[in-house]
Image: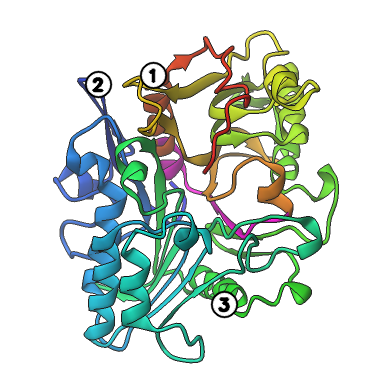
Amino acid sequence: MRPGARAAGAIAVAAALLTAGLSAASAAGAEPGVASSAGTEQSGPVFNNPLGTAAEQNAIRTRILTYVGSAPANSSVKVALYHLWDRQVAQALADARQRGVDVQMVLDESTVSSRPSDASYGILRDALGTDTTQGSFVTLCPAGRSCLGRPEFGASINHNKFWLFSQVAGAADVVLQTSSNMSPSAYSAFWNDAYVVAGNSGIYHAYSGYFSALVGKDWENWRYTSSSWSPYKAYFFPYYPGTGNSTDTIWNTLDNVTCAYVQDGATRHTKVRVAMFKFTRQGVADKLITLKKAGCSVEVVYTSTDSKESSGSAGTWETLHSAPGLSPVCYYDDHDGDPATPARIVHSKYLLIDGKYDGAVNKVLWTGSHNYSGPALRENDEALLKVDDSAAHDAYVADFNAVKAAARPGVADDTPACKGVVSQPE
């Protein structure tokens, strides 16, 4: 196991319990990612399970509330988030401000305009104020645009979902990068993941710098950036300037994969797994097919693609079905037949590589808010986190297998929802 996270996660699916990446702490009955002996917060993944108990559905939310509640006076909490429709979370942040924590938030404007009756923003506004020169504040990106997106590129969103804590019980410089918004459906209907980085000041300050750029909304001077602090690397979007596959972070990542390699005298094949809410980036789909044909094992679980039925020309749905042996699995389960309630979906956005990557045999993962869509690359505010840790990777594989096993309609994905004919708003 590489330096960094010792990951643990228990993910229930139907009547079975999958135990993933157990560390000594979790074996002793500790909460995943927390050492049981010294009580010191450790790095590692957190997964929710919309099919599980209330505790399993709320696992990510509970971890966030725990961190907010344990942040001491004179510490800081910084949050960049697409949607926050959860009064309890909003009140917990307001309470933290009252006990002397600096709470700073950047939200997409649609968190207010698309649900004006929700009280969460009002709680934050009244408690934190909106003056970004102060120690605490809540600010919105411009209407119809991300904080750093260029106006000439059209509509965009602040799609970020990360939380920064300068101090919590048991750790300093904590980054929680997640795929989850703070809303009831995010807990009870959507499969989401989070990754906690505890005590890595380099990654923490890289995220803090990006947060400051979001607050400043200085899109004219924004340039795509990344920052490495072993065993992590963070990528901050939008990717500007850049066009084409050569400036596509995910395409370049996949271009570093070697499908067949020799280890211990035997030929082995790299495994590539993708769990993705929205998959409409054609270059990334093409690259996965290239890897499949080169001998990689490729598995994809997704919620929405585009297709000739949705876009007028062959798209990612057709591409992902073009290679023998690659059977994409769609997760769009209208489980109650009621269009007014949220369908069960995979809302995570992660990539897992097990094999030869960048010239070395390794297990690596990438996770965050970044969908494989055009806007996620060039227009939206997004963050992506690379984790170079074998145990963390294996915990994500367990989550991937759980999601794949629960997915409906599964491989019978020739449906309007899976093909992007039915709109899949975030």
Type of amino acid under label 2: Ala
Whichever of callouts 2 and 3 sits on the residue coming sooner in the sequence is 2
Q: Nearer the viewer, mark 2 or mark 3?
A: 3
Tag 3–tag 1 contact (CB < 8 Å):
no
Residue 213: image x %, image y %? 62, 76
Badge 1: residue crowd in 10 Å (few <14, some 14–19, many ≥20): some
Badge 2: residue crowd in 10 Å (few <14, some 14–19, many ≥20): few
Residue, disc 2? 14
Whichever of callouts 2 and 1 sits on the residue coming sooner in the sequence is 2
Badge 3: residue crowd in 10 Å (few <14, some 14–19, many ≥20): many
Residue, disc 1? 405
Residue 195: image x %, image y %? 41, 52
Q: Is residue 151 left or right of residue 381?
A: right
Whichever of callouts 3 and 1 sits on the residue coming sooner in the sequence is 3
Residue, disc 3? 215
Q: Which residues are magenta?
A: 379-394
Tag 2–tag 1 contact (CB < 8 Å):
yes
When the figure is inspected, residue 63 is found, relative to residue 338, above or below; the finding is: below
Label 3 secondary element:
helix
**Going 28% across and 45% down the picture, which residue do you hit?**
23
When the figure is inspected, residue 165 is found, relative to residue 275, above or below; the finding is: below
